[in-house]
Amino acid sequence: MRARRGAPPLRDQVRDELRARIGDGRVAPGDRLYESAIAEELGVSRIPVREAIRMLESEGMVSVLPRRGGVLVRRLDRQDVEDLFDVREALEVVAARRAAERADQPGLDTLARLLDTGRQALAAGASDTVDEANTAFHEEIHRLAGNQLIPEMLAPLTGRLHWLFRQNVEHERVLRDHDDLYRAIADHDPDRAAAAALDHIGASRRMVLQMMADSDREPVG
């Protein structure tokens, strides 16, 4: 990893890499990270690594352990999950409503393609690809909403939201929800799109919280 003309600052590149590793499970909640090891692996100095870790700390994804050394990847407890869903629910409903008002045909084609990708991946048993398609589906809705504040407000939650997405064990239900949401947006029906988004986030909230209850352990990762 090296600085390139026009590329984001190294601290941002390191943050994005660490955020992705936490989001996709390569680094699990409760794991420790060490500046020196990360710097060596990524081929950068410890300064951008230290800055990246501070950024992730401000996002609530890691906790710095100054006395014991290293950085601890945070576990999410029930209240963390409730808080995340509260924020996600508010923003996703607004995004769906605005997307229904503003979506153009290329954007609708992208949503339809992502739905097809998810269905094909589910049939093939490729759950990781299903999750990727589902995440991209929501990101496209955010883009179609035409409100830059929505992705900006969600950006600091990216790693934690990806953790939520990985908890999905109801792939068929999620795809049905997305199909309902897509149809409402394609019909340019804001009220129906908002209701579909609200139902979708509510069902996902219940699923994750039930999984946490079934696991009978808090905090969970």
Image (tube, rainbow, N blue to C red):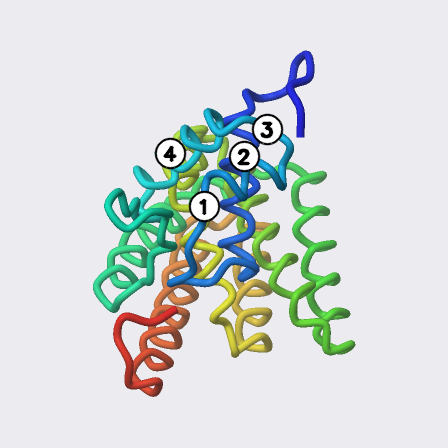
Q: Which residue is mark 4?
A: 55
Q: Which residue is mark 3?
A: 44
Q: Residue furthest top?
A: 5
Alpha-carbon span between mark 3 and mark 4 = 17 Å
Viewer-closest of 158 and 199: 158
Q: Which residue is mark 2?
A: 14
**What residue lies at 66% left-to-right and 71% top-to-bottom?**
127
Alpha-carbon span between mark 3 and mark 2 = 9 Å
**If you read the primary sequence from the N terminus, does the residue marked by circle 3 or circle 2 appear first?**
2
Image quarter of the N terminus: top right
**What residue lies at 64% left-to-right and 36% top-to-bottom?**
104
Q: Is residue 171 left or right of residue 55?
A: right
Alpha-carbon span between mark 2 and mark 1 = 13 Å
Residue type indicated by callout 1: Tyr
Alpha-carbon span between mark 2 and mark 4 = 10 Å
Front: mark 3 or 4: 3
